[in-house]
């Protein structure tokens, strides 16, 4: 999906006659980033899935649900590291 998105984006940003080359260039530039992000997501999900299974000693759909919840929370916390502290304070106050 990411290759399609960045391929179209690269083709649209390229001049006429160079669209195919621009498309491939954009895909090659973003592929390592997309692959790394997918690897982080998959690794975290698998880690949490095994941890939840070990803790609960059960094999049911709740393990995947909890693993997805924990993975999403960690990725959201990771994204907040780049925030300005003023924005974080405002967001916390808005939720109170």
Image (tube, rainbow, N blue to C red):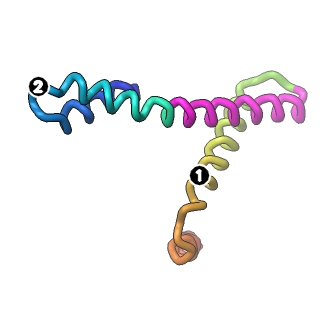
Q: Is residue 80 above or below residue 34?
A: below
Q: Is residue 90 left or right of residue 65?
A: left
Does residue 13 appear left or right of residue 63 in this picture?
left
The image shows residue 75 at horizontal and vertical percentages of 61, 47
Residue at image location 69% in from the left, 29% down from the top: 64
From the image, tell me which residue sits under label 1: 76
45 falls in the magenta region: yes
Secondary structure at badge 1 equals helix
Q: Position of residue 61 (x, y in %)?
A: 71, 25
The image shows residue 54, relative to residue 90, as above or below, that is: above
Packing grade of label 2 (10 A; few <14, some 14-19, many >=20) is: few
Where is residue 36, by image quadrant? top right
Observer-nearest of 30 and 59: 30
Q: Earlier in the sequence, mark 2 or mark 1?
A: 2
Q: State the residue position of label 2.
A: 17
Quadrant of residue 45 within the rendered picture: top right
Q: Please report the bounds of the magenta region as a residue range.
A: 35-57
Q: Residue at x 81, y 29 (%)?
A: 50
Q: CA distance from mark 2 to mark 1?
A: 41 Å
Q: Residue 90: give its label.
A: none
| For residue 60, above or below residue 36 | above
Mark 2 and mark 1 in contact? Answer it, CB < 8 Å: no
x, y percent for residue 73? 64, 49
The quadrant the N terminus occupies is top left
| Number of marks | 2
Closer to us: mark 2 or mark 1?
A: 2
Most common SS among magenta residues:
helix
The verdict on residue 36 being magenta is: yes
- Label 1 environment density (alpha carbons within 10 Å; few <14, some 14–19, many ≥20): few
């Amino acid at each position: 999906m990411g290759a399609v998105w960045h391929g179209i984006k690269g083709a649209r940003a390229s001049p006429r006659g160079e669209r195919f080359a621009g498309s491939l260039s954009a895909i090659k530039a973003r592929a390592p980033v997309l692959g790394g992000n997918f690897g982080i997501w998959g690794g975290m999900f698998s880690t949490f899935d095994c941890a939840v299974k070990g803790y609960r000693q059960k094999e049911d759909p709740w393990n995947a649900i909890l693993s997805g919840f924990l993975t999403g929370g960690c990725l959201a916390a990771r994204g907040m590291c780049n925030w300005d502290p003023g924005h974080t304070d405002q967001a916390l106050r808005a939720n109170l």
